[in-house]
Image (spheres, rainbow, N blue to C red):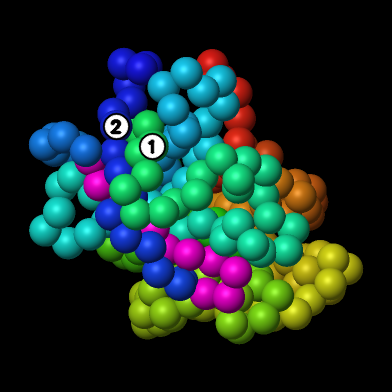
């Protein structure tokens, strides 16, 4: 097993939203994870010899230092993600887990923070928004889902009302999503911070449209999903 990973087991699983599950992952042996914020990202591998890992945003469990919750697409969902069959997420299943890592954020008094999320990327974005609000920022969040029933972590996002501006966008096609993103960005200053998380095509769209308004260095993508284990 890689030195940076530990063995964990699926403690429980429940319906999070239409086509999505919430999964509680617990360390198999008594360990204490280092502190991390909601929305931190972990790498998961099906077994110690796997040559690929999947990155997932996670949510802390109060008073627990050896477990966390993540959101996953159900194996039966349409257009299920690659490797869905490798992770059955049944109670007792073992998985190799990396140390949760917080997303670096720049909170230096920039005039605007515009955040975009889709799918389970909303978990990472909700965490980032919560951290920004904690230091006095007022982020704007645009969350995209096919239907309200498929909106992951909608309640947790809506709980930020008052410390963030929340806008849900449901049932939009690709052109309408692009128009909504453009409208959210237009106009904005070049030093605005743009943060996004979701499927690769969604983040590429945000990056391309945001590039017309802000400095490229101010566009931050929280990358999830599959990658080679040596990257």
Q: Is residue 226 visible?
A: yes
Circle nearer the N terminus (2, 1): 2
Residue 221 shows in the view: no
Quadrant location of the N terminus in the rendered image: top left
Answer with the quarter of the image where residue 91 lies.
bottom left
In the image, is residue 121 above or below residue 2?
A: below
Q: CA distance from mark 2 to mark 1?
A: 6 Å
Q: x and y percent of residue 24 in the render?
A: 32, 56
Query: Do labels 2 and 1 touch, CB within 8 Å?
Result: yes
Q: Is residue 16 left or right of residue 150?
A: left
Indicate the secondary structure of the residue bearing disc 1: strand
Could you tell me which residue is drawn at 39 percent across and 58 percent down? Answer: 23
Quadrant (top left/top right/bottom left/bottom right) for the C terminus: top right
Q: Residues within 10 Å of mark 1 (few under 14, many from 20)?
A: many
Residue 223 image offset from top left, x and y in percent: 57, 41
Left/right placement of residue 51 relative to residue 40 reads: right
- Residue plotted at (39% across, 74% down): 156
The image shows residue 201, relative to residue 176, as above or below, that is above
Relative to 172, say whether 21 is above or below.
above
Q: Quick check: is 21 in the magenta stretch?
A: yes
Q: Which dot marks residue 95?
A: 1
- For image coordinates 60% across by 36% down, the residue present is 226
Magenta stretch bounds: 17-27
Question: Which residue was labeled with disc 2?
Answer: 7
């Amino acid at each position: 097993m890689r030195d940076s990973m530990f063995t964990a087991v699926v403690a429980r699983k429940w319906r999070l939203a239409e086509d999505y599950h919430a999964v509680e992952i617990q360390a198999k042996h008594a360990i204490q994870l280092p502190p991390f914020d909601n929305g931190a990202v972990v790498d998961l591998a099906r077994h110690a010899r796997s040559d690929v890992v999947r990155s997932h945003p996670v949510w802390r469990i109060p008073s627990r230092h050896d477990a966390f919750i993540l959101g996953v697409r159900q194996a039966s969902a349409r257009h299920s993600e690659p490797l869905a069959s490798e992770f059955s997420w049944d109670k007792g299943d073992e998985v190799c887990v990396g140390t949760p890592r917080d997303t670096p954020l720049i909170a230096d008094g920039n005039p605007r923070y515009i955040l975009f999320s889709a799918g389970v990327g909303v978990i990472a974005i909700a965490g980032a928004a919560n951290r920004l609000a904690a230091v006095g920022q007022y982020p704007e969040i645009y969350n995209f889902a096919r239907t309200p029933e498929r909106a992951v972590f909608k309640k947790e996002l809506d709980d930020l009302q008052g410390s963030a501006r929340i806008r849900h966008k449901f049932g939009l096609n690709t052109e309408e999503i692009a128009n909504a993103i453009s409208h959210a960005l237009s106009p904005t200053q070049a030093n605005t911070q743009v943060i996004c998380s979701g499927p690769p095509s969604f983040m590429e769209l945000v990056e391309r449209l945001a590039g017309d308004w802000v400095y490229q260095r101010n566009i931050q993508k929280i990358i999830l999903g599959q990658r080679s284990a040596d990257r």
